[in-house]
Image (cartoon, grey):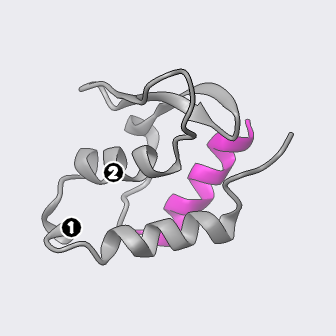
Amino acid sequence: MILRNTLQTLEQIYHYLTERPHFHRYSQYERLNAFFAEIHDTGSIEFEAGQSYLFKGIFNGKPKVMDGSKAPAFAHKQEFLSWVQQQLNS
């Protein structure tokens, strides 16, 4: 499996998002939506964000549903990025 989203890449995306104006005011759902939309691979299936914290898309070349309800707080960077990497590799 080709890993497009290495820990280093995920960390760069994390920092990119936190530099957005007013990003600190976003809710956990809005932060997750922005993050998963950024790491979603472009392809035939559109990225979908459900109100139940389910994010559907192509991640690392495979269709996947990410359950954001189990994500650590976005503000806890290391925990959050470790969780994302674990979800991508499962």
Mark 2 to mark 1: distance in Å? 10 Å
Q: Does the magenta-highlighted stretch encompass residue 89? A: yes
The tag on residue 34 is 2
Three-letter amino acid code at the position of disc 1: Phe
Q: Quadrant of the N terminus?
A: top right
Q: Does the magenta-highlighted stretch encompass residue 35? A: no
**What residue sits 25% from the left and 72% below the top?**
20
| The image quarter in which residue 36 lies | top left
Three-letter amino acid code at the position of disc 2: Ala
Q: Position of residue 41 (x, y in %)?
A: 57, 40
Left/right of residue 9 with respect to residue 48 in the rendered view: right
**What residue sits 73% from the left and 35% below the top?**
90
Q: Which residue is mark 1?
A: 23
Assign the magenta stretch its main secondary structure: helix
Q: Position of residue 25 (x, y in %)?
A: 13, 65
Please name whichever residue, 49 or 42, is drawn nearer the observer in this view of the structure: 42
Q: Which residues are magenta?
A: 76-90
Disc 2 + disc 1, Cβ < 8 Å: yes
> How packed is label 1: few (under 14 Cα within 10 Å), some, or many (20 or more)?
few
